[in-house]
Amino acid sequence: MSNLTDFNEELEGYKKIDQYNGQQVERIASHYNDILSAIGEDPNREGLIKTPERVAKALQYLTHGYDIDAAEVLRGAMFEEDYSQMVVVKDIEVYSMCEHHMLPFFGKAHIAYIPNGHIVGLSKIPRIVDAFARRLQVQERLTNEIRDCIQDTLNPAGVAVVIECKHMCMAMRGVQKQNSVTTTSAFTGEFQNDVTRSEFLRLITASLA
């Protein structure tokens, strides 16, 4: 990751160290002073004095995926392994920002691949989800980007991606349908086979209980 953001966690308690690009914070914050005035607020009142700076830092965090090379994340944990069955990582939390209204959409991603000589550290799958989700996005493109990154980097026998999200641009404004869920999918290789795809869909909907 670049100098934009650095997040560290400690086991004892929880400690997060945030580092932001000061010039970008100042630039973004200056625009939010104008925005607050434009909507009829007083940017100098007590509750809003630090709001432009807070929003600027939040936006840097919510879009820090631009500074992550998702393919490099995968390449950093690739291992030769003689395993050729399906690997599924499901219920990966997704948080992103709709590029049309800059409102959040969030939900879960379910990802599988069939190794073809290489496996990848399991934690890297959620990391590449974050790498693409932490950008201004549409769910359709996000789904394809995750699929293509895994396919192009690992060269597996197939990749499957299903994402289910709620979109605040539909719930908070517009049609205001709070319970609607958008599902997108993308498949390559063996997952274009009906039998393999059906097995994947069965696994991501099955309960271990």
Image (spheres, helix red, strand yellow):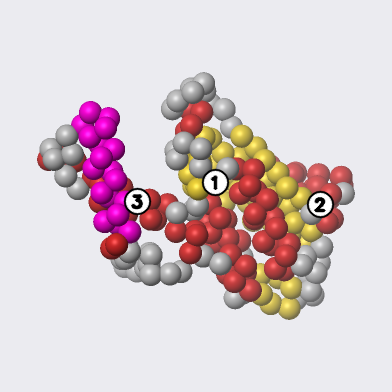
Circles 2 and 1 in contact, beta carbons < 8 Å: no
Marks 2 and 3 in Cβ contact (< 8 Å): no
Say whether disc 2 or disc 3 marks the residue closer to the N-terminus.
Answer: 3
Residue at label 2? Answer: 191
For image coordinates 26% across by 32% down, the residue present is: 38
Q: Residue at x 38, y 55 (%)?
A: 60
Q: Magenta part of the protein: which range?
A: 24-41
In the image, taking residue 40 as reference, residue 183 lies left or right, namely right
Residue denoted by label 1: 137
Residue named by callout 3: 58
Magenta span main SS? helix
Figure quadrant of residue 188:
bottom right
In the displayed structure image, the side of residue 183 where residue 159 appears, left or right: right
What label sits on residue 198 in the rendered view? none
Whether label 3 touches label 1, CB < 8 Å: no
Q: CA distance from mark 3 to mark 1?
A: 16 Å
Q: Pick whichever, 24 or 174, lies toward us.
A: 24
Q: Nearer the viewer, mark 2 or mark 1?
A: 1
Residue at 48% over, 32% down:
169
Q: Quadrant of residue 24?
A: bottom left
Disc 2 is placed on an element classified as helix
- Above or below for 104 versus 177: below
Q: Nearer the viewer, mark 2 or mark 3?
A: 3
Residue 51 part of the magenta segment: no
